[in-house]
Amino acid sequence: MFEIPNPLPGERPTAYADRAGRWYAERVSPAHKKEYGQYLTPPPLANFMASHLTPDKSSVRILDPGAGAGVLACAVAEHFAQSPKRKVRHLLIEAYETDTGLAAVLKSSLNFLSSVLGQEGLLVETRVVTEDFILSNAGILGTTATLFHAPEGPARFDAVISNPPYFKLPKSDPRARAAAEIVHGQPNIYALFMAVSAQLLAPQGQLVFITPRSFASGPYFRRFRQHFFETMRPEKVHIFESRREAFDRDNILQENIIIVARRDDERSQREENANVSVSSSEGFRDLDKIKPRVVPLDSILDLRVAGNILRVPTTEADDQTQRLVRSWDGSLHAFGMEISTGPVVPFRCHELLASTGNIAATHAPLLWMQHVRSMSIRWPALRLKKPQYMRRAENALPLLRPDKTYVLLRRFSAKEERRRLTAAPLIGGTLGSPWLGIENHLNYIYRPGGELTQDEAWGLAAFYSSELMDRYFRVLNGSTQVSATELRSMPLPPLSVIKRLGQKVRQLSTIGNDQLDTLVKALLLETHPDERKAVALG
């Protein structure tokens, strides 16, 4: 076993925990860190998170369910110790860490913390638990799993602070089975950490988590959101605009969010005028420059709407765009349309795929995400190193779609792209084949039992491609995935407006983002004159 470094003269506990954690990380393999989901919290980020805890009592019990080297636990204790109006005199910290090597570092950090803060008048007691946090507390979720039982009188914490591990669990994993009632498919373990932690909180206890933003929307986390927000009331939400900077030391590329929430079981007693603080920054280095906005709770989380999506409007323009879009009564279903995900999963039908083919006689075009650009489809693509044809064999027919007019949308996008939504019309007859193959990374809009008109297809594609809808989508979705479920439930303006937009777009000689935005704003101003500010900002 490695010899853990000692604290330096004058070193503070949070700084020591960070240094010891980085020392340990340098001595284990990337595979080891990935297995445990270890992405250690930088001290400025830990201090920012700790600053949101506001216990109003002398003895406080803190839980850190994925403690790592103890940076967050130390930051919380130092935050309480240095508060000019300190009420906390006695701090109990319970910290979980399953990596035994890192748990030894954690014990060293917390021992040093107790020693330093004890001399400063804050009594700190600590307990390091090397058991799996989810399995140790699975019974608290009230699931039907029979392998686990709720502990007798589970400890109730005043606050939970965590940078939990994040990786997907197979359905067969005992942790996934223990939480079967609140997760769907292959859950990400961080959501289980949030769910269990919320249940271990005392009434009015606080929770501060930094996680990927993916839990905030989408069908995979719907059960989790319903379970979590039944008891947890958001107080503050902070998002990081950069996908790199929050955990740049570990080369993590994802959109992160900090959520501060309070345990509030009396949903019927919640104040109707409750507010939430919303803020954003590029990363942790500019946290001192943030300007939080206070917005109504129901503008970011409407518990009456299916899915309980957590929206994050960080600007006034976001607020105005939300109000405009949510005022529309139209939808794909209201217009007799449907959206589905492309049925062709290449590895499941590789024998049907081909690099060349005769689309008039024996093959169908196979459309991939790379073929779809904003408002245009380019097939075949010259540089695409993927099979772009499908054999029209008998077993291929269930995977093929008849040659009709569709709107194709990419299911995934790069965060760095100017627009999150990439849509284009596919007009029937343009590819010269009676059948089409649509790969699984594309969504497609169609009219069951009929066909989209060209005006409808061009208008819908232009509308989804506009800056207005890009802003709306970014408020409610922080992931790279564009799910059919979210697009299906997204409000739309009247179909007559969409058709008129299609007519005008078809008359353009070139179609660029600026032209689309101008047309969309002009048409919406005609139909929603009272929302002039929202249209202009969008």
Image (cartoon, rainbow, N blue to C red):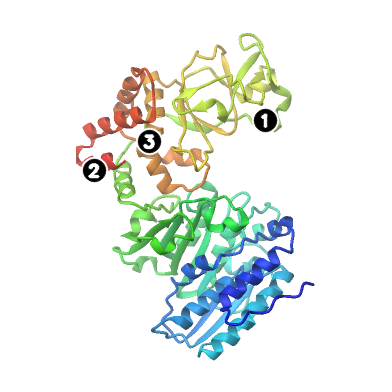
Depth check: give the residue in front, 218 or 27: 27
CA distance for labels 2 and 1: 46 Å
CA distance for labels 2 and 3: 23 Å
Element type at mark 3: loop
Identify the residue under disc 1.
346
Which mark's residue is nearer the viewer, 1 or 3? 1
> In the rendered structure, which disc, 2 or 3, sits on the residue that comes first in sequence?
3
Residue sitting at the far right? 1
Element type at mark 1: helix
Q: How crowded is mark 1: few (under 14 residues within 10 Å), some or many (20 or more)?
A: some
Q: Which mark is residue 24?
A: none
CA distance for labels 1 and 3: 31 Å
Going by the image, does 526 lie left or right of 57? left
| Quadrant of the image occupied by residue 454 | top left
Q: Residues within 10 Å of mark 3 (few under 14, many from 20)?
A: some
Which mark's residue is nearer the viewer, 2 or 1? 2
Question: Could one spot residue 130 in this view of the protein?
Answer: no
Query: Measured from the top left, where is residue 288 in percent x and y?
Result: 41, 64
Residue sitting at the far left? 530
Going by the image, does 433 lie left or right of 53? right
Q: Which amino acid does label 2 sit on?
A: Lys
Q: Residue 533 carries which label?
A: 2
Depth check: give the residue in front, 123 or 185: 123
Identify the residue under disc 3.
331
> In the rendered structure, which disc, 1 or 3, sits on the residue that comes first in sequence?
3
Q: What residue type is labelled 1?
A: Pro
> In the rendered structure, which disc, 2 or 1, sits on the residue that comes first in sequence?
1
Query: Measured from the top left, where is residue 480 in percent x and y?
Result: 52, 43
